[in-house]
Amino acid sequence: MARVLVKEKIAESGIELLRRDFEVDYLPDMTREELLGRIGGYEALIVRSATRVDAELIRAAERMKVIGRAGVGVDNIDVEAATKKGIMVINAPQSNIISAAEQTMALLMALCRNIPEAVNSLRGKCWERSRFEGVELYHKVMGIIGLGRIGTLVAQRCLAFGMRVVAFDPYISEDKAKRLGVELVPHLEDLLSQCDFITVHLPKTKDTYHLLGEAEFAKMKDGVRVLNVARGGIIDEDALLAALDSGKVAGAALDVFENEPATECPLIEHPKVIATPHIGASTQEAQDRAGTMIAEFVSAALKGEFVANVVNLPVPAEIDESVRLFLPLAEKLGLLLTHLVEGHVDEIEVEYLGGLAEYETGVLTVAVLKGFFQKIVFEPVNYINAPLFAKERGIAVRETKSEQTRDYVNLVMVRGRRDGNEVAVGGTLVGLSNAERFVHVYEYDIDLGPSQYMAFFRYDDVPGMIGKIGTILGDHDINIAHMQVGRRKIGGEAVMGINVDIPIPDEVMEEIRAVPRVRDCRFIVLW
């Protein structure tokens, strides 16, 4: 009988479910030293967020088959170390979405009606009705930044209060927004300028870090109220503090902070702020749901049954080796497309050209989707849920094939389309080592190997442009490792792709954008 260690508190129903088939030890008070000494005797481990499952612990887990996280994030688990050892990592991503949405609404109501201040006043034996005049939600404009699963639930609840809901999410289709009764705007600025309330529901990435900063607060309506029950760091806390002090922002409700625990954050003591200690998922139902769900998933994994929420889900075994070789490249092409389209697409077409077209390539198409959604959604993307994310966002996925190809033995082309516009990327493997190459970007042929840090520039093909861009990078001590230029005709438009050794700061990219005849600049972090 397999042994399961439940290291943190989960629902009793989850523990009982596991005990039907396995030997279960529930030891939430076990020390780190005890855990290291005993972990080798277990086939499964269930944790929440407090237990650090690092490489050292994983090395000691000699019999481990599955690690379950009763919740969404897996930041406390070394997924790479687990993957190398063949250990499945499973989470419960949908266990807290209702709780997070309801926490948003609770903070919204408390903010509107000054609930915490009124409660404290009355506890102090004061009766100050006139001091706590609030505002109604009815006919007010709610701005939702991020219309994923939680954002959608918040939208539905705001509509029930009679609010007008405006949303910004470049990865959501207009059809989905219309079905929800939500107005989708194409630019963040369009939302900022018209909303009485703004709430964010986004994953924390390089692109969303400090998404709401000094410039964004300046564009908001005077007296706006701001909420964050998503991730700390999406709102620039210094900029928010300044906006609160100036009166630009009438109030803020925060459940998450850039640095947690946030006991020293000046915002928590501000009179216009309602702050809670990251309790968006802290409801009995969410905790019970997370515990029960992870128990079911771990049980299924130990029995060899299918589990959809495997964070490090391996590539399906039954695929031809010729196809398997292209999987990492396909994923990178999807991620590259995400950066270049910068928003929703109505359709993703994956075309296979050459000898590759003779094989079953469905898994490559899924790999493209896995890469495409990697930086967009909250939860880890795998080979099971990637197509579901496309379906949720109303993206049609097509696969086409042709055994004829002009320049390469095999070629994978990925095209993102919206409103008649198309962005295309293409790649192949070359040489005996099957080295990855990006060979098509936008509508231009290039030949550039993928790297962690890359940039693409579109400009008028006139003398001196390469030198101007290179000089700016050099002046900022940014080394170009490789460079390729593609163009169709002399004097037309050209695209330059480069590999660089370090990230290119935003201010450097802005300096390049300011160069006359530069049309577009994109810096990309591929992994």
Image (cartoon, grey):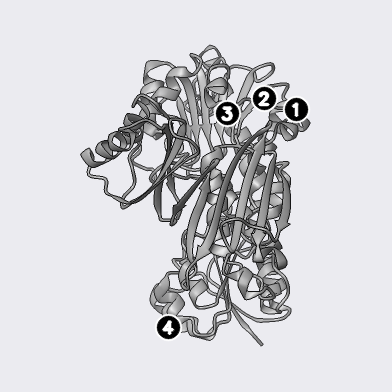
In three-dimensional space, the C-alpha distance between marks 4 and 3, rounded to whole angstroms, equals: 48 Å
Q: Which residue is mark 1?
A: 181
Q: Tell me which label, 4 or 1, sits earlier in the chain.
A: 4
In three-dimensional space, the C-alpha distance between marks 3 and 2, rounded to whole angstroms, equals: 19 Å
- Looking at the rendered structure, the kind of residue marked 4 is Gly
Q: Which residue is mark 2?
A: 165
Locate residue 195: give its quadrant.
Answer: top right
Placement of 397 over or under 224, stated as above or below: below
* Residue 491: percent from left, percent from top: 43, 30
Q: Which residue is mark 3?
A: 110
Residue 256 appears in the picture as rendered? yes
Q: Quadrant of the C terminus?
A: bottom left
Circle 4 SS class = helix
Circle 1 SS class = loop
Disc number lying in front (4 or 3): 4
Circle 3 SS class = helix
Q: Tell me which label, 2 or 1, sits earlier in the chain.
A: 2
Disc number lying in front (4 or 1): 1
View extreme (top): residue = 130
Placement of 24 over or under 339, stated as above or below: below
Residue 350 is left or right of residue 239, and the answer is right
Q: Which residue is mark 4?
A: 37
Q: Mark 1 and mark 2 in contact (Cβ < 8 Å)? A: yes
Circle 2 SS class = strand
Circle 3 crowding by C-alpha within 10 Å: few under 14, some 14–19, many from 20: some
In three-dimensional space, the C-alpha distance between marks 3 and 1, rounded to whole angstroms, equals: 25 Å
* Residue 360: percent from left, percent from top: 72, 67
Q: Tell me which label, 3 or 2, sits earlier in the chain.
A: 3
Foreground residue among 337 and 390: 337
